[in-house]
Amino acid sequence: MSGRFISCIKEASPSAFRTIWWLAKLMVGVSFVIFILQYVGVIGWLSRWLTPIFGCFGLPGEASLAFVTGYFVNCYSALAVITTLDISRRSITILSVMILCAHNMIVETSVQHKTGSSVMRIVCIRTLSAFFLAFILNLIMPEDTSRVSASVVNTDDVGFMTLLSDWAVKTLKNIILMVVLVYLLTVLQRILSEFGIIAKIAGMLSPVMRFFGLPPRTAFLWLVANTLGLAYGSAVMIDETERGNTTKDDNDLLNHHIGVSHSNLEDLTLFTAAGGYFFWMLLSRWCMSMLLVWGRRLEKKVITCLPSS
């Protein structure tokens, strides 16, 4: 028994370290570029440009800053902006759905591309899903006058070196967390596979996968994406693909689902704590992900039926 555990660790380590190195370079590079863009005002300019569009979703112009920040960085950055906004719980829910659909776009799209999906397609479906769901929710959600108290933080007088130091500390913490989680998760995945537990998980979740239009063998990856998210779960997704346990077609279907609905453990809890309505945020994205997956399946079926030129 101990020999099988040691063998799993030895087999998983090279793959885990390759993914960790790739992901760390990507995260640090993207994060630093976005930090500079925020400092020089480009992110703020983008949010002001989007302000008229956000009126169509029943959101104030300043909500666009939270969306743009989350789009290029992550949910934590977007939440920091949301806490400064004096808006209703209804508005927080709509804005949170947009951010949950389309956040950390550069890093997460890179992960999804590495597992078999087109970069442009993933960017388009995540971005358009965010706007589509915001429009629909603004139409169907009941009016809500309850407000969430804002805590305004003034950073105008903070110097560049202070902001750079703060960015470096936060990035280092994220990298350390990523290294630990990615390594442990990769080892866990090999152990679960070695002892046949992944197959049992896939069997138990098979009805859920079929309901969402997903292949049953993607059940474990779906579980990882829903609990840990795309960035931290990338090692398992990439490893499963490289070992041939899932095909690129399987992963492409899965990416259409988890692109708009992942990290439903941590991120969803955080946005609920910020004032969003839990079930509106969860169910709206599940419906959207189902629509995307079944639409993708139909698209592939039509393409195969077309006569070849």
Image (spheres, rainbow, N blue to C red):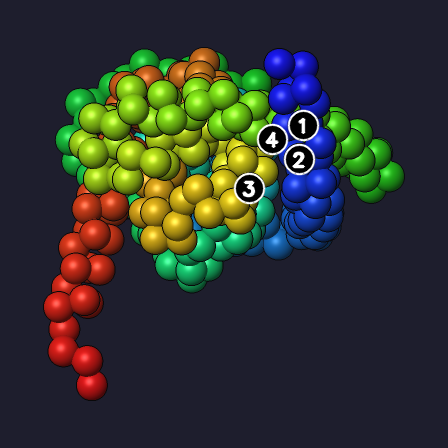
Marks 2 and 1, how far apart at CA: 6 Å
Q: Residue under circle 4?
A: 186
Q: Position of residue 100 (x, y in %)?
A: 41, 34
**Quarter placement of the N terminus:** top right
Residue at x 52% of width, y 45% of height: 243
Q: Counting other residues with Cα less than 10 Å from the Cα at mark 1, is it few (<14), some (14-19), or many (20 or more)? A: some
Q: Which residue is mark 3?
A: 239
Return the disc, 2 or 3, that comes first in the chain's sequence. Answer: 2
Marks 2 and 3, how far apart in space? 11 Å
Residue 9, image x, y percentages: 68, 27
- Residue furthest to the bottom in view is 309
Mark 3 residue type: Asp
The image quarter containing residue 133 is top left
In contact (CB < 8 Å): disc 4 and disc 3: yes
Q: Nearer the viewer, mark 4 or mark 2?
A: 2
Contact between labelled residues 1 and 2, with CB atoms less than 8 Å apart: yes
Disc 1 marks a residue whose amino acid type is Ser
Tell me the residue at 25%/45% (across/down): 293
Q: Is residue 243 above or below residue 273?
A: below
Residue for badge 2:
11
Judging by the rendered image, the residue that carries numbered circle 1 is 7
In the rendered structure, which amino acid carries the disc numbered 4? Thr
